[in-house]
Amino acid sequence: MQLARVVGNVVTTRKDENLAAVTLLILQPIAPDGTDMGRTLVAVDAAGAGVGERVFFVRGKEASFPFHPVEVPTDAGVVGIVDHWSLT
Amino acid sequence: MQLARVVGNVVTTRKDENLAAVTLLILQPIAPDGTDMGRTLVAVDAAGAGVGERVFFVRGKEASFPFHPVEVPTDAGVVGIVDHWSLT
Amino acid sequence: MQLARVVGNVVTTRKDENLAAVTLLILQPIAPDGTDMGRTLVAVDAAGAGVGERVFFVRGKEASFPFHPVEVPTDAGVVGIVDHWSLT
Amino acid sequence: MQLARVVGNVVTTRKDENLAAVTLLILQPIAPDGTDMGRTLVAVDAAGAGVGERVFFVRGKEASFPFHPVEVPTDAGVVGIVDHWSLT
Amino acid sequence: MQLARVVGNVVTTRKDENLAAVTLLILQPIAPDGTDMGRTLVAVDAAGAGVGERVFFVRGKEASFPFHPVEVPTDAGVVGIVDHWSLT
């Protein structure tokens, strides 16, 4: 999983029906020091996150677990909103 | 998932039988600002996309979900056509 | 999925039994303009491809779909031989 | 799998319910010579690891195996704490 | 799959119980010309490989197939020992 900042969202009307009720967010992955790290991506939201919040997301089929039994065809999903983290 | 632009298609007659009825598109991934980002790839189409359209696609086994119960051997698939997106 | 050129093959006698009857090819991924793109890899063949042919291959568990019900332990497989492709 | 050093942890209250009882660690992957290698990531802990310990972790759906039958939506998990390793 | 050279092994006592009987090898991926290619990684051994041997390994959940029905939480596994390969 990686930390990320929610930077936008995507509007789409023609899509797979299992994505119909799903919110699509644009994420910018970030390093633990808060700087941007790597490419933006589109993820489904399973945590009720909004633009500007810091979240962590999962890649792969696991991103569809929170929507079972619906088989959401996604490879990235926000699964938690971060309160804070600590580094040593 | 990532945003992409459909830039071409692939014609193939000798292939796995579960790919027989599937359209194969060449995608160029793009960043939210519309610029190219990363390598082109071949994806199956589950959204009825055409050359020139902006789409978002999924990587991994999830790309075969829209074709169930057929087990399409693919690792990338277009699952939605983008109307627009917003960035903050 | 990605386009590739078959550039060689691998001979191995000691291997997982579910790989026993499988042909192993060395692939060089290529871009739509035909130039090499990224690293060579070893893939199983589900399309009857030979050295010198242009193919497309799939990564991940999906590469084992054409061999069901045998659980071939592979993460890459040739699933089609390319006739031609078009770019815009 | 990769070797890593546990460098921190993440606190989050709003998250997928299947992550409720799971500890989230920040990992820095390391090379066999002990130097940092690649980006930090967030992983679930299935081995009782603590900050400062050297561990190895798994990526992908496999990271959720130790928590079955709970379907933990994670793509990275610590599965062992390293005593030592040898190189030739 | 990729070609690799076995360069070491990992000793660990505290780990997931499904990894208890599994040998952990350190691999250096190699290109078909025998030169190092990419980062070392830790893999389980399903082929009886030893340090110094040239092998090929698989990434992802497929790496756990040879151990069924045990659900080994691994994302990389040696599945064959290479006799030789040919390039054109």
Image (spheres, coloured by chain):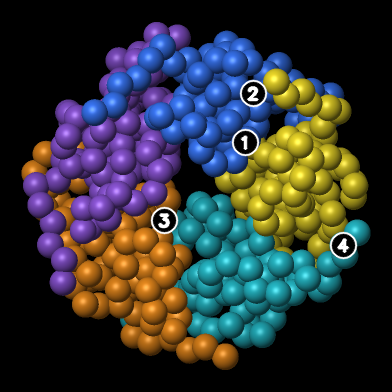
Chain colours: A yellow, B cyan, C orange, D blue, E purple
Q: Are marks 2 and 1 in contact (CB under 8 Å)?
A: yes
Which kind of residue does numbered mark 1 sit on? Thr
Quarter of image, res B45: bottom right
Between residue E41 and residue B79, name the one nearer to us: E41
- Label ID, residue B1: none
Task: Answer yes or no: is residue A39 visible.
Answer: yes
Crowding at dot 3, Cα within 10 Å, few <14 / some 14-19 / many 20+, comes out as: many
Chain of the residue on which disc 4 is drawn: B
- Label ID, residue D7: 2
| A29 up-or-down from E73: above or below | below
Mark 2 vs mark 1: which is more N-terminal?
Answer: 2
Picture residue at 63% right of the left edge, 83% below the top: B50
Left or right, C45 with respect to D4, comes to: left
Whole-angstrom CA distance, mark 3 to mark 2, is 32 Å
Q: Nearer the viewer, mark 3 or mark 4?
A: 4
Whole-angstrom CA distance, mark 2 to mark 1, is 9 Å
Query: Mark 1 highlights which residue?
Result: D40
Left or right, D16 with respect to C87, comes to: right
Which kind of residue does numbered mark 3 sit on? Arg
Which kind of residue does numbered mark 2 sit on? Val
Q: Secondary structure at mark 1?
A: loop
Q: Nearer the viewer, mark 4 or mark 1?
A: 1
Between residue E6 and residue B76, name the one nearer to us: E6
Residue C72, position as x, y percentages in the image: 28, 45
Crowding at dot 4, Cα within 10 Å, few <14 / some 14-19 / many 20+, comes out as: some
| C25 up-or-down from D78: above or below | below
